[in-house]
Image (cartoon, rainbow, N blue to C red):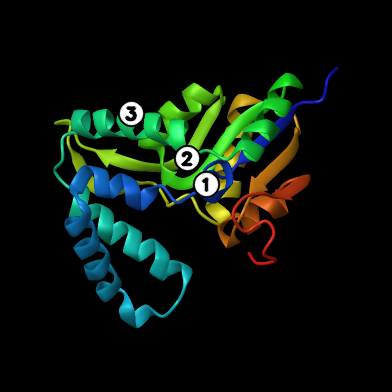
Amino acid sequence: MTEAVVAAFDFDGTLSTRDNFVPFLRRIAGTPATARAFATGAGHVATAGRSEWTRNGIKAAVLERLLSGRDVADLDDAAHAFAADVVRRHLRAEALERADWHRTQGHRLVIVSASLAAYLRPIADQLCFDAVLATELERDADGRLTGRMQGLNVRGAEKAARLDAWIARELPGTTPFVWAYGDSSGDVELWARADRAVRLGRRAHKGTS
């Protein structure tokens, strides 16, 4: 029996050559509003110090300020247009080559990212990935965004937790060999969980996390 293999890829800085969260917010809300939202969010958590809570707190505050009350259909339209631009202009050739190699070997391909699932799903469809495990946006019964994340921000330990949950759901009764590709400190726990950790992307040659 062939051993199951999963290749988990971070997105921003790994599969993509850049961060995509801020450019997407600028597309949907405009540059001035996005800048004000980050300034306000940073002010709200300034007393917390430089920590993971600070990072997650700013992200939550920014999303609430910019997305609360927006129509889900409008978000999805913007996400698909944004995804097409990312695929056309902002993907890393080296990472795509690794993904293509895994695909030819019959491995399962998963994006695991703190970026927004709204635009990662259409990107994953175009790249023939099997799943997206990313930050979800809460939607209300009237088809509008609440401005809150649905579940946790998919960074750090949450990346490993989401991957394990997906494996249990999609590959029950197996213990697949896991490759993990990332570029930053947000991928440390995913690397630790993997059988083969690979630093790939914008920080790969800088010796930092």
Q: Nearer the viewer, residue 147 or 23?
A: 23
Per the rendering, the mark at residue 80 is 3
Tell me the amino acid under the disc marked 3. Answer: His
- Helix, strand or loop for disc 2: loop
Q: Earlier in the sequence, mark 1 or mark 2?
A: 1
Residue at 67% across / 64% down in the picture? 206
Q: Earlier in the sequence, mark 2 or mark 3?
A: 3
The CA distance from mark 1 to mark 2 is: 6 Å
Is 31 positioned to the left or the right of 100 in the image? left
Per the rendering, the mark at residue 90 is 2
Residue 12: percent from left, percent from top: 50, 48
Residue 116: percent from left, percent from top: 39, 42
The CA distance from mark 3 to mark 1 is: 19 Å
Residue 185: percent from left, percent from top: 59, 62
- Select label 3 or label 1 by which is in front: 1
Tell me the amino acid under the disc marked 1. Answer: Thr
Is 181 positioned to the left or the right of 77 in the image? right
Residue 187, quarter of the rendered image: bottom right
Residue at 85% across / 17% down in the picture? 1
Q: Residues within 10 Å of mark 1 (few under 14, many from 20)?
A: some
Residue 135, quarter of the rendered image: top left
Is 209 positioned to the left or the right of 32 in the image? right
Residue at 24% across / 35% down in the picture? 75
Q: Nearer the viewer, residue 129 or 168?
A: 129
Residue at 18% across / 58% down in the picture? 32
User: Residue 172: in sight, yes or no?
Assistant: no
Q: Earlier in the sequence, mark 3 or mark 1?
A: 1
* Marks 1 & 2, CB-CB < 8 Å contact: yes
Per the rendering, the mark at residue 17 is 1
